[in-house]
Image (cartoon, grey):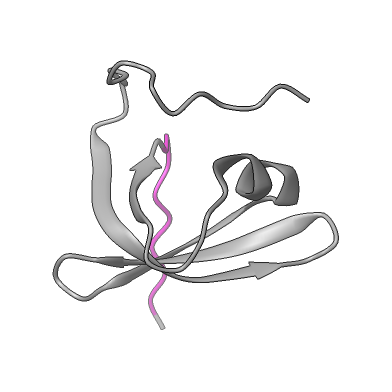
Amino acid sequence: MASLTTSLPTMRLSARNQLEGVVVRVEHGVVMSTVVIRLVGGQEVVSAITKDSADSLALAEGDSVKAVIKATEVIIGKD
């Protein structure tokens, strides 16, 4: 597998929801990894990505990252 280059120029994305934060936890499973990102305001976003992707990004606690959210639907429930 080819490794990602960290010296790429800044990539422009169509996704408008780009949240900056810090990795507070990475839990690796056999196939998937769970990444917990603490945002500037203290909220946390949890992302489930493939273990291969987590390994390629070399994600670790304390890394500054950006959560990019691209969704066509938001589902809301209420009791």
Q: Is residue 54 above or below residue 4?
A: below
Q: Is residue 32 left or right of residue 16?
A: right
Residue sticking out furthest to the left: 41
Dividing the picture into quarters, in which one does residue 30 lie? bottom right
Residue 73 on the magenta segment: yes
Dividing the picture into quarters, in which one does residue 31 lie? bottom right
Split into 4 quadrants, where in the image is the C terminus? bottom left
Q: Nearer the viewer, residue 40 or 64?
A: 64
Q: Pinpoint residue 59: horizontal percent, then vertical percent.
A: 53, 54
Residue located at (32% from left, 19% from top):
11
Q: Pinpoint residue 27: horizontal percent, then vertical percent.
A: 64, 71
Magenta region: which residues? 71-78
Q: Pinpoint residue 56: horizontal percent, then vertical percent.
A: 63, 39
Dividing the picture into quarters, in which one does residue 48 lie? bottom right
Residue 5 on the magenta segment: no
Residue located at (24% from left, 51% from top):
20
